[in-house]
Image (cartoon, rainbow, N blue to C red):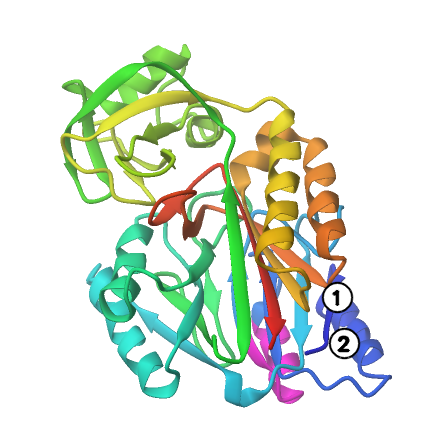
């Protein structure tokens, strides 16, 4: 499989880059499209659809194909994957029946492929991404490979979008289904945020809606712990500060803890919507942003993945938390460059509201403050 990555700051630039990529006879069948909510996604979809290219698309908090992250731009990974080896699925969940929706998708995928794997992006900050993962697992089994990221909106946390050739949704998902008998897919999720303080108990929650921790409204406890003074709806950067610097760490019986920052505040009772389930009675700790050594940890994990599971890759997709970009600043360029250099394959990625992958030593999880690196290789 051949792949190429292109980028631009307008539809016109992408049109020129696409035309240039085809000059050597390259005939892409699939495009992974990451773009700013400010870009004209309909124009991009028309451009790619007119070229006969299937689309897996999401809006972002920043996007990249190389070490320099873009802002307000478009990043596209093009692949000439055999059309018999993949399909694009799309659905919405206005009733919040996340698990049922992905279970239905998984059933359809098994009708086509004996060993399906999934790349997914979802929209809306209320979405329980962990429930989406469980739907795939219910049907395919615990071994199923699922990787992805929740769409962003340039840090406004107000309206995200996922899209395919002729479909789009502010509360839905786009899914790339791969035939694992033909396309190898391997990935690693690396966080690095350090736990701090004592274990605390989630005393009231429903799904991904956390009301109280230690019988205190979760927003109030977070603000007190972090020394946040302006806790009001007028503070437009409050949720960004909480998500990037004061996320909760959910403790697991097996595997590493997973991040559960608040992504949406309910001001009526000072509760949070997180992008993954936080069970009532579970244990959490606060966490601090990482030192810069976490960049090296991400690169080392990718090198380990290459050495043990994926010596070569035709293409690489990266889902990196928006909070990492805010916390690490210019150091994020070193991380992206390091990932790129591991396989030296065409790459595209974006800064997401949540990352979906298997936790180290554990189960499929919704992550935050994490970099999920996915390598693809035709067998």
What residue range appears in magenta? 42-55
What secondary structure predominates along the stretch shown in magenta?
Answer: helix
Q: Is residue 214 magenta?
A: no
Q: Where is residue 202, by image quadrant? A: top left
Which of 216/148 is in front? 148
Provide residue 283's location: percent of width, then percent of height. 23, 26
Residue at 59 percent across and 68 percent down: it is: 32
Quadrant of the drawing holding the C terminus: bottom right
The kind of secondary structure element at disc 1 is strand
Q: Are marks 2 and 1 in contact (CB under 8 Å)?
A: yes
Residue at 66 percent across and 80 percent down: it is: 47
Estimate the spatial distance between the alpha carbons at disc 2 and disc 1, rounded to whole Å: 7 Å
Dot label at residue 18: 2
Residue at 61 percent across and 83 percent down: it is: 53
The kind of secondary structure element at disc 2 is helix
Crowding around mark 1 (Cα neighbors within 10 Å: few <14, some 14 to 19, many 20+) is many
Asked if residue 331 is positioned above or below residue 75 in the image, the reply reads above
Dot label at residue 14: none
Between discs 2 and 1, the one toward the N terminus = 1
Q: Where is residue 145, by image quadrant? A: bottom left
Which of 101/317 is in front? 317
- In the image: residue 136, left or right of residue 268: right
Dot label at residue 6: 1
Provide residue 281's location: percent of width, then percent of height. 14, 30
Asked if residue 259 is positioned above or below residue 81 in the image, the reply reads above
- In the image: residue 100, left or right of residue 48: left
């Amino acid at each position: 499989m051949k792949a190429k990555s292109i980028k631009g700051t307008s539809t016109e630039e992408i049109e020129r880059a696409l035309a240039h990529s085809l000059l050597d006879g390259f005939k892409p069948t699939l495009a992974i499209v990451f773009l700013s909510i400010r870009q004209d996604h309909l124009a991009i979809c028309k451009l790619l659809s007119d070229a006969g290219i299937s689309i897996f698309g999401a809006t972002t908090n920043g996007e990249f194909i190389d070490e320099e992250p873009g802002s307000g731009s478009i990043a596209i990974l093009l692949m000439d994957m055999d059309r018999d080896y993949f399909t694009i699925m799309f659905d919405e969940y206005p009733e919040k029946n996340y698990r049922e929706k992905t279970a239905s998708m998984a059933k359809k995928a098994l009708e086509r492929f004996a060993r399906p794997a999934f790349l997914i992006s979802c929209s809306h900050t209320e979405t329980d991404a962990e429930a989406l993962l469980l739907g795939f697992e219910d049907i395919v089994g615990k071994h199923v490979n699922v990787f992805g990221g929740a769409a962003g909106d340039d840090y406004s946390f107000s309206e995200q979008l996922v899209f395919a050739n002729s479909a789009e949704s502010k509360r839905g998902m786009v899914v790339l289904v791969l035939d694992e008998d033909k396309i190898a897919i391997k990935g690693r999720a690396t966080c690095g945020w350090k736990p701090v303080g004592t274990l605390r108990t989630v005393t009231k929650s429903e799904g991904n809606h956390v009301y109280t921790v230690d019988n205190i409204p979760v927003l109030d406890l977070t603000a007190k712990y972090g020394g946040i003074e302006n806790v009001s709806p007028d503070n437009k950067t409050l949720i960004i500060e909480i998500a990037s610097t004061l996320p909760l760490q959910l403790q697991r019986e097996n595997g590493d803890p997973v991040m559960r920052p608040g992504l949406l505040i309910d001001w009526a009772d000072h509760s949070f919507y997180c992008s993954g389930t936080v069970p009532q009675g579970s244990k959490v700790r606060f966490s601090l942003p990482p030192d810069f050594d976490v960049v090296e940890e991400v690169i080392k994990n990718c090198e380990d993945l290459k050495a043990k599971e994926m010596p070569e890759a035709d293409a690489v997709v990266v889902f990196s938390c928006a909070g990492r970009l805010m916390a690490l600043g210019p150091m994020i360029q070193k991380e992206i460059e390091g990932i790129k250099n591991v396989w030296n394959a065409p790459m595209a990625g974006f800064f997401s509201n949540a990352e979906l992958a298997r936790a180290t030593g554990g189960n499929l999880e919704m992550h935050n403050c994490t970099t999920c690196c996915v390598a693809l290789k035709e067998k």
